[in-house]
């Protein structure tokens, strides 16, 4: 007895791969590669530098950075070669040849503090009410999910 084997389906290609293939050989291909500088910047240079310096423009191999204070401008002057190396390594190609520093506004990284909402114990009446509300669902699995959602909603209400 042999089983019918289904052919394996290919995973969808990432949009960036599709765009790269579509734009190959056009001037837009280079612009797409250059745009990756903004994507890799924070990780390439680290949080400390990224908090004080951000890419502003890129033209013909020169990356212009906005830096938020004179002390950081001075410090980054000494780190230009290291920054170029780190960004190019993150890009997997040598796009950045030179860095120019300018005083300017720098976006602050968003705080990633995730606060769990407070939960409380439901009373017996609230539990019964949640069960009663879920009874309208005919499918047992759907009914259980619906009841769980109602309970969670009530647990988070003050």
Image (cartoon, rainbow, N blue to C red):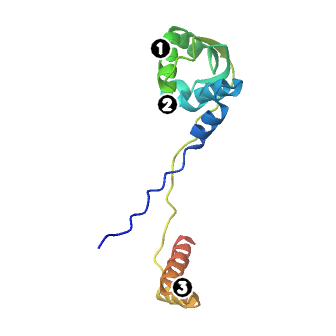
Percent position of residue 88, x then y: 51, 20
One can see residue 158 in this view: no
Sequence-wise first label, 2 or 1: 2
One can see residue 153 in this view: yes
Front disc: 3 or 2: 2
Q: Residue at horizontal 56%, vertical 73%?
A: 153
Q: Secondary structure under badge 2? A: helix
Sequence-wise first label, 3 or 1: 1
Q: Residues within 10 Å of mark 1 (few under 14, many from 20)?
A: few
Q: Gap between marks 3 and 2, in whole Å? A: 46 Å
Q: Gap between marks 2 and 1, in whole Å? A: 14 Å
Q: Residues within 10 Å of mark 2 (few under 14, many from 20)?
A: few
Which residue in the structure is indicated by mark 2?
Answer: 43
Q: Quadrant of the C terminus?
A: bottom right
Q: Secondary structure under badge 1? A: helix
Res 37 → quadrant: top right
Q: Gap between marks 3 and 1, in whole Å? A: 60 Å
Q: Which mark is residue 134?
A: none
Q: Classify residue 10 as left or right of residue 15.
A: left
Q: In the rendered view, would you say 90 is above or below 13?
A: above
Q: Residues within 10 Å of mark 3 (few under 14, many from 20)?
A: many
Percent position of residue 46, x then y: 48, 27
Which residue in the structure is indicated by mark 3?
Answer: 130
Nearer the observer, 3 or 14: 3
Which residue in the structure is indicated by mark 1?
Answer: 82
Work out which residue is located at the far front of the displayed protein and give it.
Answer: 1
Nearer the observer, 150 or 115: 150
């Amino acid at each position: 007895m042999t089983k019918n084997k289904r052919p394996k389906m290919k995973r969808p290609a990432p949009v960036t791969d599709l765009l790269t293939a579509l734009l190959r050989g056009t001037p837009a291909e280079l612009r797409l590669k250059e745009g990756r500088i903004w994507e890799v910047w924070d990780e390439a240079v680290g949080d400390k530098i990224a908090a004080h310096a951000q890419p502003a423009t890129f033209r013909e191999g020169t990356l212009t950075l906005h830096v938020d204070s004179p002390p950081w401008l001075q410090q980054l002057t000494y780190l230009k070669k290291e920054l170029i190396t780190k960004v190019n390594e993150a890009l997997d190609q040598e796009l950045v040849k030179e860095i120019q520093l300018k005083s300017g506004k720098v976006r602050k990284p968003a705080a990633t503090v995730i606060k769990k909402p407070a939960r409380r114990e439901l009373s017996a009446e609230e539990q019964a009410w949640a069960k009663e509300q879920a009874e309208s669902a005919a499918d047992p699995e759907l009914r259980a999910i619906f009841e769980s959602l109602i309970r969670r909603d009530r647990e988070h209400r003050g």
